[in-house]
Image: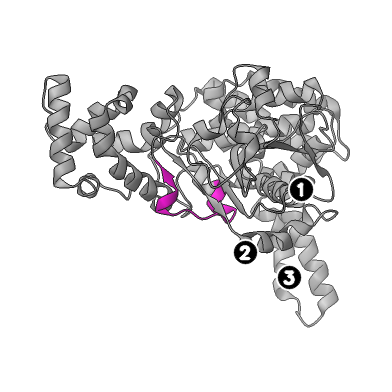
Amino acid sequence: MNEMKPDAAEPSKASYRKLARLAELLIEIQARPETEPGLFQKFQAQYHEVPREERPWLFDVLLRRVETRKEDIEEQLHLLMESAPENSIEWSRLLTGLRRKMESPRMRAFRRFLNTSGGFTFLLDLRADVLLAQRQTSLELDPLDEELSHLFTSWFQHGLLFIQEITRESSFQQIRFLKGHDMVHPMASLEEMGNRLGEDRRCFALYHRAMPEEPVVFIEAALTRGIARSIHEVIRDDSSPERSRRTPDTAIFYSINNTQNGLAGLGLGKVLIFQVVAAIKKDHSAIKTFSSLSPIPGFWSRYLQPLLQGKSSFALKRDRLEQLFSDKARNGLLEHQAKTTGHRAEDLCSALLDILSDPSWVEDRTYVRWLKKPLRDITHFYVTKEKNRQGKPLNPVANFHMGNGATVTFKNINFGANLSDRGLQDSCGMMVNYIYSGPWLQEIRRTMRSWLPWNV
């Protein structure tokens, strides 16, 4: 089940009137026979004046007020129902007319924005705000998200995408951009970025021809011997001698970053992964295995912590979780926690909450001994069994990779794989290998033709 979302605080009557005027301005924009940059700039300026906490309500107003009305389609629908389907030409003509009338005024206005300077960037930011509002409130904004997604999906086809490998010889501007936009494993310096562009490292970026200076998504890969199960095997000093002596047979995708939040969920990551696999296979025929080494964002704060506190409605319950610990492990943890802290927890879940809230637990060999297997079990359950309202993996990274065709088994759940402060605080040091198989490559080769027809 999904996590409960708070209701958005309803704005004042004065604020509502401002939101209504923005909706009326959008109606005016779509009604004009031609795109008018002045109206777009006015809408953009007024939108940015809306406080962020009120934007979810603006989206709700747009859905309610800027919509196709029943009377707009009633006549066309009646003509369609009265017509004879045998007359294929007439049937098609009426269907086309109905489809045209059914398109929402929002969609017509958004399409105008694409033809206006700055309009595409504004729509990207707009969808990013819609996605944020969906995560943070209980307002139903799916129709608005679907319209923007459809608009971007259409615009990101027809040969407008191109891939480029980033190397140490690439421009300083490109390297600095990637260094500043790696949110998975942030870099402290450009020298660290240089290490990630070494001989057994690869970095590829996907661009749109309308924004040739900024990639929309980029991926960092390590060429390894066998599957890397710890980020510390991947991100290390380039002078390590082992890295140049072994012939790689595996490519590890360890950092995938979408640089535009408004493009999340549109499948561009799949496009890039496919192209990267093809490029690596071309240059390294010995590489047969393709895998990610992925973080588990929110595993602690949004899943395990509320589960231990009894404040969740997940598929995994507290009693089921406790059964993942043997009697020996349960007693060992309770006794060691009491000895370490000076007070004995009431039950196992309380003890785990106390232990895992402090990242220093990983330095205690006793804790590591008793937690290794249960934490792997909990993580495996989380990424494979916990679903959102749409029946997809609850964890966004699991949803991305498994939605793209990757698989995960228990042996690919890695304990102590990220011992950085961030890794311990966010996911108790756990990471996951999602495996991309040969059949997956054959399957998506067919689906990629509409995205990248010149290279598949």
Look at the image and tell me whether residue 387 can be seen: no
Task: Kindly identify which residue carries mark 2.
Answer: 439
Q: Nearer the viewer, mark 1 or mark 2?
A: 1
Task: Kindly identify which residue carries mark 3.
Answer: 80
Look at the image and tell me whether residue 441 can be seen: yes
Q: Who's the residue at 55% across and 47% down the image?
A: 226
**Magenta-tinted stretch:** 400-414
**Left or right of 341: which side holds 6?**
right
Please tell me whether residue 249 is drawn above or below residue 300 in the rendered image. below
Q: Position of residue 400 (x, y in %)?
A: 56, 47
The quadrant of the image that shows the C terminus is bottom right
**Left or right of 156: which side holds 134?**
left
Q: Position of residue 203 (x, y in %)?
A: 70, 36
Q: Position of residue 335 (x, y in %)?
A: 12, 31
Badge 1 or badge 2: first in the primary sequence: 1
Question: Magenta segment: does it hold 354?
Answer: no
Badge 3 or badge 1: first in the primary sequence: 3
Q: Identify which residue, 187 or 26, lies in the foreground.
A: 187
Task: Kindly identify which residue carries mark 1.
Answer: 283
Residue at the far top: name it: 189
Badge 3 or badge 2: first in the primary sequence: 3
Q: Amino acid at mark 2?
A: Pro
Asked if disc 3 and disc 2 are in contact, CB closer than 8 Å, the reply is no
Q: Position of residue 111 (x, y in %)?
A: 78, 41
Disc 1 to disc 2, C-alpha distance: 21 Å
Disc 3 to disc 2, C-alpha distance: 44 Å
Question: Magenta segment: does it hold 403?
Answer: yes
